[in-house]
Image: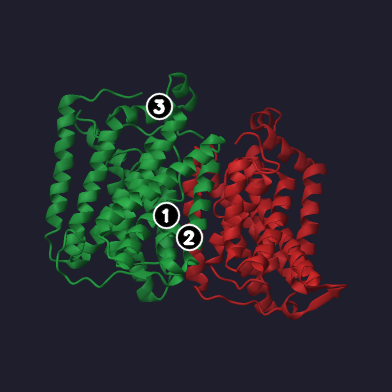
Chain colours: A green, B red
Amino acid sequence: MPKKFNEATDQKRWIAGAGVFVILALVGFLSNSYVISLMTIVLLFTFMGQSWNLMLGIGGQLSIGHSLFVGLGAYSVAVLNIKYGISPWIGLVVGLTIAGFVGALLAWLSFRFEVRGIYFALLTIAAAEFARIMFSGWEFVGGMQGMFFQAPTGKTDILMLRGDARFYYFVALGVAAIGVLGTELISRSYLGYVWRAMRDDDEAARALGVRTFRHKIIVISISAGSAAVGGGILALVQGSIFPDSIMGMGISVDVLIGPVVGGLGTAFGPFVGSLAAIPLNHTMSAIGDSLGIPGLNNIAYGIILILVVWVLPDGIWPAIVRLYRSIPPLPRLKISQPRKVEE
Amino acid sequence: MLSLWLNVLASGVLLGLVYGLVALGLTIIFGVMRVVNFAHGEMVVFGVYIGYWSVRLWDVPIIVAAAIAAVVMFVFGYLLETLIVKRFVNRPHHYQFIVFIGLALLFSGFLLVAFGPDPRPTASQLSFHTVSIGLLKLDLARLQAAATAGLLIILLGAYLKYSAFGRSLRAAANNRLGGLVVGLNIPQIYAVTFGIGTGCAGVAGALISPLFDAQPYLAVDFTLLAFVTVIVGGLGSFSGALLGGLTIGVAEAVAALMFAPSMKTALPYALLIIILIFRPRGFFGAKEI
């Protein structure tokens, strides 16, 4: 049931959101480079998580193969930049277009034949794994050896999207802000209402005249395209890409862990979730490396995922909001309660 | 040339039977409980490690190792269901899926911590023996694995079809509410079902331990392979799992021969995409999920 936004609480939402981003901008001026590079990754996965969130949290379609779109974005940027010296800006647009098209194609093919629910989720994994294996065997894009960007000169060049760690931090902050703002705006727009209606009850939405087939294609295409933008920037930040790391299952899990832990269908959930999960993952793998025990980070991720679904099925962010609201009778900070998703 | 093709086909069929057993485990769990066990590949890898350690520590034949794997993995599955999975059976699909992704990560992390990332070949006598039948030259490990898997599939099928427990299990799969009404102990049936499913995966893992080096990273491949097999055959269908296993086994072998060996790994996914698009319920799939 979409609720009408109250103007007073609305204003508070915007202030709170802007406040968080001002604090994050200040973090960018810290001198600790480890924190900055870690936060860059957190913000990029916030953005990619937001795109995944749009698809499941608002559109009701589960994807476990988002690495496909992330990888397509990363490869578009890398191939155009490394092979032809073309600016990553163009690479990002190309990646967005390709991934958006591939997402739309996948959605069109599967929903045309009523491939839904689990079957659609499995189709996304199959497509991602297929693409990963194809890219591993494709010499033009470097195959298993991957591709390497030119070593950064340290000079900031906005046209070529090159710069130091701090520069990439602000790029990541920018896209994360666009992601949060975009989700907020989309979920308030006509499309947001239509998608939530479709998520909650496909047939009822159709009965009301919503062309759910078309809208599923649109939501998946937008989600895929924005994931590709995140992937392109991730490739630049990492400086190199390999099919196993940029298109592997690991990326799909990293993308979905933020929104699941933080709160499905919320604007801030993916940020809260990524902020909780990604530093934990890095810490655990650092501990594992120093002790010579690989796999600790997998155990940590596994336990978090199980516990969150067990104890806080809505995620951390709605729980924080509930806690905050239980003190004084104050504003509503979430877009909508994630409810039953089409099975 | 003919003998080459025959041999490739035969080895595909033999491995396909083992894939069929893996897929059978996944499909039984799905058919009865309507949950998708995303950690199925980890169960297979547990089986491979059980095979590896039994042979290494006690030097037992693979058949005995498979029996050990069956018991251990059945108990493991039973406990896993009663302790964790049970709580998520009635949740929406995407929550279940996320829980199982969590379990898969947890188990693969555990495997990495316990055994390290290095592959460990099982030093079985079997690995080097071959049998010749006419034009065919089959390696004994493969033949034995396939024979055991085939026998188990038949026995399990007969058990589910004719025993009292099998009937109640099929009843629970057919209509959960109806089963409750006539007094079936649904929680126990679910736990045993999950145990049978993981047991199948464990046995299959132990059987192929002479063919595959034990390695934690195999798990993802086996999970996806089991999904592909099951979907090709149809989720929840017994004969579908078997047919799917044979299809994938043969297709992999033929692809490795006709194209590059690397195509072998890509082919199942291509097949899955094609099947999902044109026949989403697989060969014998359940009508509704």
Looking at the image, is mark 1 or mark 3 earlier in the sequence?
Answer: 1
Outermost residue toward the top? A208
Which residue is the site of mark 3? A197
Whole-number angstrom distance, CA of label 3 to CA of label 2: 34 Å
Q: Element under label 2? A: helix
| Residue closest to the eye, A195 or B18 | A195
Amino acid on which disc 3 is placed: Ala
Q: Quadrant of the N terminus of chain B?
A: bottom right
Which residue is the site of mark 1? A67
Disc marking residue A171: none
| Residue closest to the eye, B257 or B93 | B257
| Residue closest to the eye, B110 or A20 | A20
Quarter of the image where one finds residue B58: bottom right
Q: Quadrant of the C terminus of chain B?
A: top right
Q: Element under label 3? A: helix
Counting from the top left corner in percent of width and height, residue A165 is at 20, 65
Question: Do pointers 3 and 2 mark residues of a single chain?
Answer: yes
Residue in the picture at 31% in, 38% down: A266
State yes or no: discs 1 and 2 in contact (Cβ < 8 Å).
yes
Above or below residue A4? Residue B157 is below
Indicate which label's residue lies in the foreground, 1 or 2: 2
Indicate which label's residue lies in the foreground, 1 or 3: 1
Kindly identify which chain the residue marked by label 1 belongs to.
Answer: A
Q: Would you say residue A259 is visible in this rendering?
A: no
Indicate which label's residue lies in the foreground, 3 or 2: 2
Whole-number angstrom distance, CA of label 1 to CA of label 3: 27 Å
Q: Element under label 1? A: helix
Which residue is the site of mark 2? A132
| Residue closest to the eye, A307 or A286 | A286
Kindly identify which chain the residue marked by label 3 belongs to.
Answer: A
Q: Would you say residue B96 is visible in this rendering?
A: yes
Amino acid on which disc 1 is placed: Ser
